[in-house]
Image (cartoon, rainbow, N blue to C red):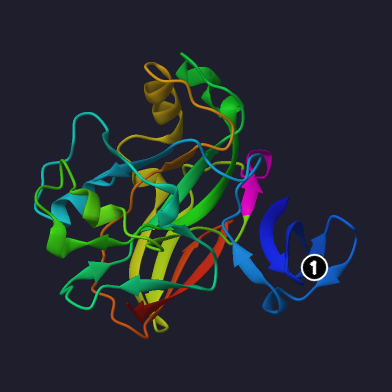
């Protein structure tokens, strides 16, 4: 099932996809363009922890002229970075290079501590799509990204759907793509991750407790380009959804 959180008639609602429309918990159906989309957070409305992977695709590491990491390169993101489907992301006026990153997001389904790889999928509640913008002007070192590179308000759209884990047969074989104003600029597949979903659940839970609703952004393949005000960016992952976002001047 595909879940969403929306703002409709001045109230926040949980909804599910139903034949191209949204069905609210009270049974009403509404059109997708009649609502304001929020990050599809579930089972809690606010994630306790947002973890993000850098250089988790070998081709992206090569594109940036960095050696692929031998263990996960991880940074933490703030909740204020999140925004929803069809919302605006603001680009600071002085910035010279700001690029998208299409990423599969793992949504933790239940408390995970010292989970073994073979059991990892039991602790995944679902998946969504993130567009984890990076502001390259502030970058000092990809191995330790400056906070301003990845933690600007509105710079991490996620959605539109949270898809139940049981409905995704193999999350490590999903095609990813990004278009800018309708032009294909990025194409990849989750099978090319250096550290896959089971590894990440085992790795993180070995030293920290993951809670339901925590998010793990799993990195992006190569093909990133600069995005300017007015650009419409669509980051899409097969079986999960197509996330639409527009760049606006701050």
Q: Quadrant of residue 178?
A: bottom left
Q: Residue at x 40, y 30 (%)?
A: 200
In the rendered image, residue 218, in percent from the top left (x then y), is placed at 38, 44
Residue tagged 1: 19
Who is closer to the viewer here, 96 or 233?
96
Q: Is residue 197 left or right of residue 148?
A: right
Residue 164 among magenta residues? yes
Who is closer to the viewer here, 124 or 228?
228
Looking at the picture, does residue 5 appear above or below residue 54? below
Q: Residue at x 14, y 59 (%)?
A: 138
Numbered disc 1: secondary structure: loop
Task: Single out the residue that lies furthest toward the right.
Answer: 27
Q: Residue at x 41, y 65 (%)?
A: 177
Circle 1 Cα neighbour tier, 10 Å, few/some/many (<14 / 14–19 / ≥20): few
In the rendered image, residue 196, in percent from the top left (x then y), is placed at 39, 35
In the rendered image, residue 173, in percent from the top left (x then y), is placed at 48, 46
Q: Which residues are magenta?
A: 162-168
Who is closer to the viewer here, 164 or 138?
138
Task: Single out the residue that lies furthest toward the front.
Answer: 10
Looking at the picture, does residue 115 appear above or below residue 204? above
In the rendered image, residue 110, in percent from the top left (x then y), is placed at 61, 26
């Amino acid at each position: 099932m595909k879940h969403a959180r929306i703002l409709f008639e001045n109230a926040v609602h949980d909804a599910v996809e139903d034949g191209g429309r949204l069905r609210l918990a009270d049974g009403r159906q509404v059109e997708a363009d009649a609502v304001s989309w929020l990050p599809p957070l579930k089972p809690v409305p606010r994630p306790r922890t947002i973890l993000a992977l850098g250089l988790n695709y070998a081709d992206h590491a090569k594109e940036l002229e960095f050696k692929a990491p031998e263990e996960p390169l991880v940074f933490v993101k703030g909740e204020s970075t999140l925004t929803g489907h069809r919302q605006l992301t603001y680009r600071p006026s002085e910035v010279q290079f700001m690029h998208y990153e299409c990423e599969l997001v793992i949504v933790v389904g239940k408390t995970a501590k010292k989970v073994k790889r073979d059991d990892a999928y039991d602790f995944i509640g679902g998946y969504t799509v993130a567009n984890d913008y990076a502001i390259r002007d502030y970058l000092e070192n990809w191995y330790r990204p400056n906070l301003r590179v990845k933690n600007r308000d509105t710079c991490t759209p996620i959605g539109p759907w949270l898809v139940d884990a049981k409905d995704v047969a193999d999350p490590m074989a999903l095609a990813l793509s990004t278009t800018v104003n309708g032009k294909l600029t990025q194409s990849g597949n989750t099978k090319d991750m250096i550290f896959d979903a089971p590894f990440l659940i085992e790795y993180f839970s070995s030293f920290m407790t993951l809670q339901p609703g925590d998010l793990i952004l799993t990195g992006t393949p190569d093909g990133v380009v600069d995005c300017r005000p007015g650009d419409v960016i669509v980051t899409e992952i097969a079986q999960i959804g197509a996330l639409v976002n527009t760049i606006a001047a701050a």
